[in-house]
Amino acid sequence: MSASGLTAGNTASISTCFVSGDTQLFQQLFYSADHKHGGTLPVPVHFLMDEFPNVSLPDDFEKILSVMRSRGVSVSIILQNIVQLKALFEKNWESVVGNCDSLLYMGGNETSTHKLISESYLGKSTLDLNTYGKSTGRNGNYSTNYQITGRELLTPDEVRMLDNRNALLFIRGERPIMDGKIDIMRHFNVRGTTDGKAEPYLHGTVTQSVATLICDEKTDPAKLPEPAAPEGEYELLSEEDLEEIYNKNIEGEKQNEKDQQRGNRKPTRNHQW
């Protein structure tokens, strides 16, 4: 099954999230970027939104898409064809595509997608057309006509017939690229999957532990000793209290930097002329 992918924002990401469209997650990331990190997240976050038409999307997703780049957040939208995007955003689907820096077309069998790729993304090429004419007889002649014409790099029909081994990549500011698809079975990380003869992943299995507690049928929970609480005083803080403490620490660090800079300055001399 083939698919198309749209990528918006910074693709050089470190942290990757798989989401089903939680509005609160975007709000928390934007809040953290604006109020705690000076406008940009220190670790870029990239969302892989597979089966994009079938997930619950945040409200005003097209607006979120247009402001996430500056905050270090990016998203890859994966869908089967452009019709699915038009069904989700009837009037704003073009703005969703326009906010994406790259589009990867891996093939498909939907007519409007072929037309969009051919006319809006691939464009036309210039061709030199030479026409030769020759007539025979008593007054025969020979003529040559040189003409410049244009045609689509790939017509919609040629886009439909794209070799399944190839894909089309469109990057903002660059010429279209036709390249071969990667063979997943040759990827070096396949050795960590069952296809690479690795053990299957079992959710909830303990892989790294520092202690083991075993209770068998002979153990009476009522006779187990109460855990000793560590000595010390504790205070339960709210999010507002934590944020206030965090802001005070930031202000204190900035003031210390200013004091150090003032202490490193050399005294100036007053010259009299």
Image (spheres, grey):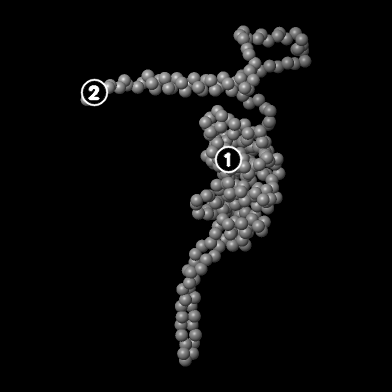
| Residue 272: assigned label | 2
Disc 1: which residue? 67
Q: Residue at x 59, y 36 (%)?
A: 16
Q: Nearer the viewer, mark 1 or mark 2?
A: 2
Which quarter shows the C terminus?
A: top left
**Relative vertical location of residue 154 with respect to residue 229 in this rendering, above or below:** below
Q: Residue at x 58, y 49 (%)?
A: 98
Q: Earlier in the sequence, mark 1 or mark 2?
A: 1
Residue sitting at the far front: 273
Residue 119 x/y as whole percent: 58, 59
Q: Residue at x 49, y 80 (%)?
A: 133
Question: For the residue carrying disc 1, how many other residues have a C-alpha within 10 Å: few (<14), some (14-19), or many (20+)?
Answer: some
How much space separates mark 1 and mark 2, taking CA atoms?
56 Å
Question: 249 or 218: which is nearer to us?
Answer: 249
Circle 1 — which element? helix
Q: Amino acid at mark 1?
A: Val
